[in-house]
Amino acid sequence: MIKVAINGYGTIGKRVADAVSVQEDMEIVGVSKTRPSHEAFIAKERGYPLFIADIAKKPAFETAGIPVAGTIDDMLKSADVVVDATPGGIGAKNKALYEKYGIKAIWQGGEDHEVAGFSFNSDCNYHQAIGRQFVRVVSCNTTGLCRIIHAMDREYGVTKVRAVMVRRGGDPGDIKRGPIDAVVLNPVTIPSHHGPDVQTVLPHIPIVTLAMIVPTTMMHMHAVQMDLKSEASREQVLDIIEKNPRMGLVRKATGITSTAELKEYAMDLGRCRSDLWENGIFEESVSVLGKELYLFQAIHQEADVVVENVDAIRAMTGAITDPQKSIGMTNKAMNFTAI
Amino acid sequence: MIKVAINGYGTIGKRVADAVSVQEDMEIVGVSKTRPSHEAFIAKERGYPLFIADIAKKPAFETAGIPVAGTIDDMLKSADVVVDATPGGIGAKNKALYEKYGIKAIWQGGEDHEVAGFSFNSDCNYHQAIGRQFVRVVSCNTTGLCRIIHAMDREYGVTKVRAVMVRRGGDPGDIKRGPIDAVVLNPVTIPSHHGPDVQTVLPHIPIVTLAMIVPTTMMHMHAVQMDLKSEASREQVLDIIEKNPRMGLVRKATGITSTAELKEYAMDLGRCRSDLWENGIFEESVSVLGKELYLFQAIHQEADVVVENVDAIRAMTGAITDPQKSIGMTNKAMNFTAI
Amino acid sequence: MIKVAINGYGTIGKRVADAVSVQEDMEIVGVSKTRPSHEAFIAKERGYPLFIADIAKKPAFETAGIPVAGTIDDMLKSADVVVDATPGGIGAKNKALYEKYGIKAIWQGGEDHEVAGFSFNSDCNYHQAIGRQFVRVVSCNTTGLCRIIHAMDREYGVTKVRAVMVRRGGDPGDIKRGPIDAVVLNPVTIPSHHGPDVQTVLPHIPIVTLAMIVPTTMMHMHAVQMDLKSEASREQVLDIIEKNPRMGLVRKATGITSTAELKEYAMDLGRCRSDLWENGIFEESVSVLGKELYLFQAIHQEADVVVENVDAIRAMTGAITDPQKSIGMTNKAMNFTAI
Amino acid sequence: MIKVAINGYGTIGKRVADAVSVQEDMEIVGVSKTRPSHEAFIAKERGYPLFIADIAKKPAFETAGIPVAGTIDDMLKSADVVVDATPGGIGAKNKALYEKYGIKAIWQGGEDHEVAGFSFNSDCNYHQAIGRQFVRVVSCNTTGLCRIIHAMDREYGVTKVRAVMVRRGGDPGDIKRGPIDAVVLNPVTIPSHHGPDVQTVLPHIPIVTLAMIVPTTMMHMHAVQMDLKSEASREQVLDIIEKNPRMGLVRKATGITSTAELKEYAMDLGRCRSDLWENGIFEESVSVLGKELYLFQAIHQEADVVVENVDAIRAMTGAITDPQKSIGMTNKAMNFTAI
């Protein structure tokens, strides 16, 4: 059993904890929280030992009825791998701590590539992660782009990607962030930084990305266009997508035309937290115009990286060396059936 | 086993179907849908026989891969009780059909009181529903108001209720309805029709309601004020709420101050569809100023009536005559633990 | 003086009326409304004679204190040109009426190209509109695309356009339309119909458009990419934009990064109704990568076609044959200074 | 001519500047800004001398093409009155500066009552402001409540006010603040701090307020209920409102039922920045039930205090001692005709 610690039990951390806890070859040794909150109650409910950064806050947790198992140092001592899911920019500061305990560590896409020196995506470069101490799982948007670009590149060769990313303003439970009624260019400059981030995983792909933020909490939406080296047919492309367990086709027959309906569908399917771990690629949108491929894909910002973290744990520990085997194990344990 | 049909497998219908299907004394004999949609796929996934109004549409369903079990008439013939969860105003037109088959029927709050001649709330008038052929479960807002008013009235006597209801514009999966950026008075006139609707259940309560619609999908929020006949203490009121299995206290220690965080909490708890079947009463808001009680309660528009429908089935069939026993059975089967 | 009637005094109609009324060579002979509303009060306030479709509704208007000048037929008899600003799809039905009175008519982009047989944009094809009886001013999005594509095509040659259009769900005063919290693909299919609509004005331009709808009321945002035939420099492109009176540069120095801030800026400038009649092209976004041009432009859905309607009136009546002269007159009268 | 400086040229400051500049007895001697922004360009466009806090930033302004007239100290030296419209909490820190220059100062409602020791509303306590050095104009919500409560109290006596305030999340041009999809209790506790703030102006009124924040930018909406000492009729109440130049009736005949339509109406009326300086009281909502008065009023958070600031200037300088005369002058200069 691989012993996994989750440093930062928030939007991503709580999902990774639940995903890890259902894997047959892993167990959660602890999760961390900086202050009592509804998520600390959930950790208690789930039975995850809760560790805190500042032990002086122990009474505050206990007064709220939440037992504290120790400090983050205590948690790290008992773990083989730590998944750092602290807020963007904080994770890098934890590196020294992980080095001190000689523990394997996974960071999220909110940190720079340099923090780990290796950026991971299960489909693209699982093999290169085997045995590494430090790995960064790329962001939700980069993960979604890498999956589809890599699949097309392997089959047809991709000579250029142009992607417009329409991003959610905040997560559903986030009441502070806007905008309320605006389209915000973020950044205004073109290309955005997302293209280079894709290149941390797929360095040979020429890609230009544009990004904006809109007043929704549900998912991101990508309008993706690729120049292909060799001829493709729409049917082939749909077939490739269908066969990839980390990409899902939002079928025309469902009548789904939006992120909101897609989340409702995931909810109705009984998915944990209504999560979509796969790219939600709209079947009807997939179009091959000459050597150009166009499609829309919805990316669930809270979820798609969760399964990547689980695979990264297996790769780094060397537990499984075949990416497809790990992907299959991860998905099966999470009851991740096709949309 | 009480055989239950669900006429209208949408927002409410799909939830009632799942709630019924986990009750030990009930089973789903069928659900109905007018056209193929993502929800028809869910019915198939759940294994609910799917019946359709217009048999001419059978090929359209089958082309989409959704088997059709027969017509709505076929469904009704095999059921003891039908839960009508068709869109508001449609349900009344189905009454003749239910009379034709001599079947017991439950309508939702989108229909007028007169369609059933009896408006139901488990806490308030379960006994009066015993043996009835026709029952109307009141709307989500009326259900939420009835629960808290009745509980206070039984203990202290309520001489006046004033409630401002801030309503969601559309459900999360609804992409048509607005507003996008407005507060809409609906109605502009005071009092709104919600007060008289409460009186279909609690006829002796003087109540004035005001209602508006805002650009959110999450939940409704009620600002409730009651004049009490006898002295109350805040602690007593909290105690009454805590002991009522259909009302939940949103505790200060969770840090939750909004509908969005409350829905996130329900999601994290693993609730089916992240549903809140209980009134979400904010602990910190509960205030007793002289003989006036004030509080905020969040009402999940898609969920609170679901459990009422299950209880109504038991009352009408006479299966259980003790309301608390039915409420306990319903809640337990749904794994409805306190927030 | 050209006598202008406005059939449909709503979002577009009221703006065209005000724009026409300040032109030295035009006057408003009447506007029409189907029922009393806040806009009917505004017509009265502005002193525009109000005509109604159904004279039986005259008492309803008069009870509300709004004088009625006659029927739409009466209005048409006194006009040289009618601007049809009725809701999309209604305009086509009015064609017979306009033919009956032998009046020149302008439709909006909600109607098909075929209704007029000629689709208009001041920059692109003013000359071809001279003397025509029927003209269609293309939609706000098509207008915005035509302006920038035509300007680049004239200078560099455009061999391909790819545009992703992120559209507002409803106008600011529209309380019915959503979505509230979703990104809606509209249409899901690629390409969308917007490309062919651009080709009604610029038939030789190969263009692929993708469109989605988001929960905002402010403006549309276009992510535009063009393949250029000859080399361009960023400075040249900025210079062309700057010199075009119907395109505006949203300068980096203003700190504006969103539609909301841009509308605020137009408001602060004292623009009538805070309108942006020009394309709002974000200076910082303008990028030339090899022979590819990228940029973001914000399009005010309520406003950019207003000035086009004014020019179309001049072209059709033959009052002015030089497009730049008409554009200059229109802009000057509206106090349309650069953003 | 009263020389007025505006310290903080943002949402409120820019409006007060424009309002002051059209008064026949006042002039703007300068406005201040901390960094170049779109509003600094507007100050230049309007011809207001621009002063800056940190003279080291002068080159940054000048590079952007915005001339700098001097420091804030320079500005204060040339003014009789300063209107402090800096962000909430900053204003109090400026008090020492205003004392140093012996200048009269007005703060906004974001500051505590204690900063000025006197909280102002034109209708309620103009006389008490005469000759004062320091005055605080209460917040938009408090201003709106004071106007209607005072008017009813003067006529009928008000023994109790209960008000639920549904507040906008951010202003239209604010792209940072949320929520996007939530109703936020702010505060969760009851009563909110708004009641005591009303009592800084009307100390004898018993008032309980409840407040929440919703995802809109347009206006606040108040659901107001008052217990009256003597009998009132609906017609009388409407008459009082109609005669008060700072309260407007949103007439049923306009068909307006929301904040969005009301803002559109103000826009169509040609109001500067589409501002509603008056309470927007919905005619249809005004209801007298026994001795209880109910109504809905929309409050434009950016605007209603603007006219109060102008009156406060006149009162403090002693220029006009009759409140109705000042109100009339202010309104007339702003072309503030009834909605």
Image: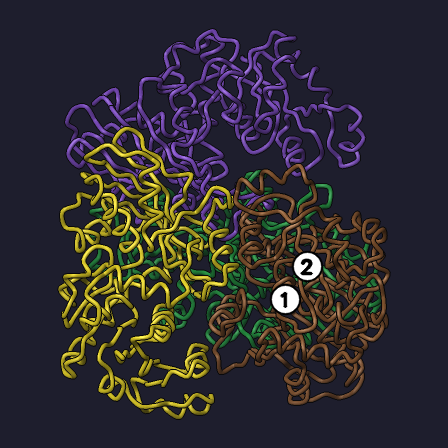
Chain colours: A purple, B green, C yellow, D brown
Which residue in the structure is indicated by mark 1?
D21
Image position of B15 with respect to A105: above or below = below
Q: Answer with the quarter of the image where residue C191 lies.
A: top left
Image position of D25 with respect to A277: above or below = below
Q: How many marks?
A: 2
Sequence-first disc among 1 and 2: 1
| Camera-side residue of B140 and D144 | D144
Q: Chain of mark 2?
A: D
Closer to viewer: mark 1 or mark 2: 2
Image position of A97 with respect to C91: above or below = above
Q: Residues within 10 Å of mark 2 (few under 14, many from 20)?
A: many
Q: Residues within 10 Å of mark 1 (few under 14, many from 20)?
A: some
Identified by mark 2, the residue type is Val
Q: Answer with the quarter of the image where residue D281 lies.
A: bottom right
| Camera-side residue of B226 and D185 | D185
Q: CA distance from mark 1 to mark 2?
A: 10 Å
Q: Secondary structure at mark 2?
A: strand
Task: Identify the residue at image location x=70%, y=15%.
Answer: A74
Q: From where the camera sits, is residue D138 visible?
A: yes
Query: Where residue C231 sits: x, y (%)?
Result: 24, 32
Can you tell which mark lies on residue D29?
2
Q: Chain of mark 1?
A: D
Q: Are marks 1 and 2 in one subunit? A: yes
Task: Identify the residue at image location x=41%, y=50%.
Answer: C214
Query: Where residue A317 sits: x, y (%)?
Result: 49, 9
Tell me the quarter of the image containing the N terminus of chain C.
bottom left
Query: Where residue D127 sits: x, y (%)?
Result: 83, 75
Task: Identify the residue at image location x=74%, y=57%.
Answer: D78
Identified by mark 1, the residue type is Ser
